[in-house]
Image (cartoon, rainbow, N blue to C red):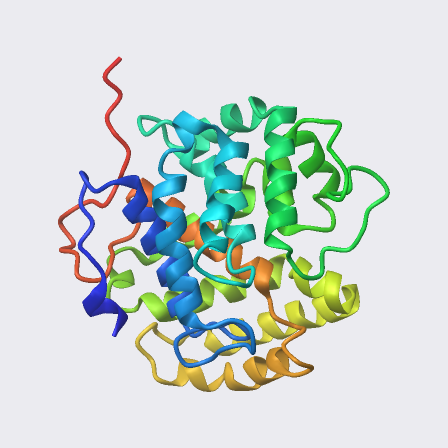
């Protein structure tokens, strides 16, 4: 069982452990349409995501020293050494800038500086990482296509892709969906997260998908299907309204949505939303806004160091 295997995280725990925990928690929750311990895809299993989390955590923990673009490439390289499918390109693209924020600064204060310092060299490393990961449903673009070398900074090329990709949109909007939507929701749960982490993560997925139609679904199945998935997520949220996180009835209302997302050969997999969930979890752990399984409520899990200036 996941909870018994998670290590307690305290204020002195390394950044790598927060990254690993966020990735494992995201994959462990039985989110509609995604891989989890009781549901796999033909080419992806829960164990693949766990191995990937363990591979990228120590790499991303050194983003401040190595740089965002090079770290993203190294993380995908480490992933490809342990799994054969793309498990985490979106997660890595999201976590690297967040991990690059100095630990004495809140993420909302520091992420803008990280994004503003991104260079064309960062973009070149990221393009190599994308080609190495070989993600599905990428498609082609008229400008700054990953099949060629970038001509702008990583922030500039991500901004060009923001309308068609939810991960790229975070670079363009300063990680607004993560820091202004996801983290506040998790913070509102507070101490209940440790006991009801799975229900909280599933609701986070539904909230993000309802507000921002999943762009992986849109690229693979079309905008109308992505909008339909968002509508169904909103319907699920309406059914959950008034139910506590501990209610056994919560899972019942998700069964039909889960079946619909998994139909058509898993082409409706809300993969971009899953990546965003992992980023929200990391940010919440890093900022100390949630209590983790097996952690006393009196101990803050914040990884931020006090400003000694």
Residue 106, percent across and down? 37, 31
Image check: 209 left or right of 164?
Answer: left
**Residue farthest to the front?**
81
Residue 58, percent across and down? 34, 43
Residue 74 visible, this angle: yes
- Asked which quadrant contains residue 258, the reply is bottom right
Residue at the image point whose x is 23% and y is 45% from the top: 301
Residue 184 visible, this angle: no
In the image shown, does 82 or 174 lie closer to the viewer?
A: 82
Question: What is the tally of numbered marks visible in this picture?
Answer: 0
Residue at the image point whose x is 64% and y is 55% from the top: 134
Residue 154, percent across and down? 64, 31
Residue at the image point whose x is 15% and y is 47% from the top: 299
Residue at the image point whose x is 75% and y is 38% from the top: 160
Residue 264, percent across and down? 69, 82
**Residue farthest to the top?**
309
In the rendered image, the vertical position of residue 47 relative to residue 274, given as above or below: below
Quadrant (top left, top right, bottom left, bottom right) of the C terminus: top left
Quadrant (top left, top right, bottom left, bottom right) of the N terminus: bottom left
């Amino acid at each position: 069982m996941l909870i018994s295997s998670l290590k307690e995280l305290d204020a002195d725990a390394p950044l790598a452990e927060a990254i690993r925990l966020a990735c494992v928690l995201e994959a462990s929750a039985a989110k509609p349409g995604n891989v989890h311990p009781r549901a796999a895809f033909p080419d992806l299993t829960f164990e693949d995501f766990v191995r990937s989390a363990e591979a990228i955590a120590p790499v991303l923990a050194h983003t401040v020293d190595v740089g965002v673009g090079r770290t993203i490439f190294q993380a995908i390289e480490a992933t490809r050494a342990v799994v054969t499918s793309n498990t985490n390109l979106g997660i890595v693209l999201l976590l690297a800038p967040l991990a690059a924020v100095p630990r004495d600064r809140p993420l909302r204060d520091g992420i803008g500086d990280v994004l503003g310092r991104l260079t064309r060299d960062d973009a070149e490393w990221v393009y190599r990482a994308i080609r190495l990961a070989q993600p599905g449903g990428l498609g082609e673009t008229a400008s700054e296509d990953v099949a060629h070398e970038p001509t702008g900074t990583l922030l500039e090329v991500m901004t060009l892709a923001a309308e068609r990709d939810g991960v790229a949109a975070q670079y363009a909007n300063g990680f607004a969906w993560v820091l202004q939507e996801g983290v506040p929701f998790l913070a509102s749960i507070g101490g209940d997260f440790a006991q009801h982490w799975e229900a909280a993560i599933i609701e986070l997925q539904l909230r993000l998908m309802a507000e921002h139609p999943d762009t992986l679904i849109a690229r693979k199945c079309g905008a109308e299907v992505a909008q339909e998935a968002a509508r169904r997520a909103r319907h699920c949220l309406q059914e959950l309204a008034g139910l506590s996180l501990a209610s056994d009835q919560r899972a019942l209302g998700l069964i039909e949505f889960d079946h619909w997302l998994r139909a058509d050969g898993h082409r409706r997999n809300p993969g971009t939303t899953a990546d965003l969930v992992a980023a929200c979890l990391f940010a919440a752990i890093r900022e100390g806004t949630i209590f983790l399984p097996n952690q006393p409520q009196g101990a803050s899990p914040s990884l931020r160091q006090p400003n000694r200036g």
